[in-house]
Image (cartoon, helix red, strand yellow):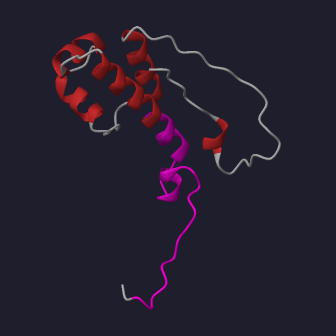
Amino acid sequence: MSNNEELKITKSSGNIFNDLGYTNPDEYLLKVKFAMVVNKIIKDKNLTQMAAAKILGIDQPKISRLSRGQLAGFSLDKLMTFLILLNQDIEVNIKPHSSNMSYDNLSGHFSLNYPG
């Protein structure tokens, strides 16, 4: 790029999967958030992939895929089950959203908090 060319910047929607044109981008984002928590707990507990696989009832190659963010084959239900198997409680809070939030970007309508 030469000095005379202008760089075009596009503001993110707040969901990289939406920006990249994924189908069901909000589901992808939520899965990533859950997977990040699962991976953090595995790391914090100093579990090997083999030990984590035994606890979660899956094989080591699936733990490897999970740790690299390759989430095909991991449903939200399965990721939540992993958290329970790792001695975590999951709490869902439902409340009215602020009136200025749009319906075209669902990622602003959910959050995932992990104190660890």
Rendered residue at 75%/46% (across/down):
101
* In the image, residue 66 lies in the stretch drawn in magenta: no
- Residue 80's place in the image compared with 24, above or below, is above
Work out whether residue 33 or residue 116 is closer to the camera in this orientation and state it: 116
Secondary structure mostly taken by the magenta-highlighted segment of the chain:
loop
Looking at the image, which residue sits at the far bottom?
4
Task: Give residue 73's position: percent from left, percent from top.
Answer: 34, 33
Residue 61, by quadrant, is top left
Quadrant in which the N terminus appears? bottom left
Instruction: Please state the horizontal and vertical placement of residue 75, each as a whole percent of the image.
Output: 42, 29
Taking the image as shown, residue 116 lies to the left or right of residue 40, namely right
Lateral position of residue 70 relative to residue 3, left or right: left
Q: Residue 12 location, x and y as percent?
A: 56, 58
| Magenta residue check for 15 | yes
Q: Is residue 30 above or below residue 46?
A: below
Q: Give x and y (percent) for residue 33.
A: 46, 34
Q: Quadrant of residue 46?
A: top left
Q: Is residue 107 above or below residue 11?
A: above
Please give the name of the residue rendered at 37% of the width and 30% of the height, measured from the top-left corner.
74
Instruction: Report whether 62 appears left or right of 35.
Output: left
Q: Between residues 64 and 39, which one lies in front from this camera angle?
A: 39
The residue segment tinted magenta is: 3-31
Quadrant, the C terminus: top left
Q: Nearer the viewer, residue 97 or 62?
A: 97
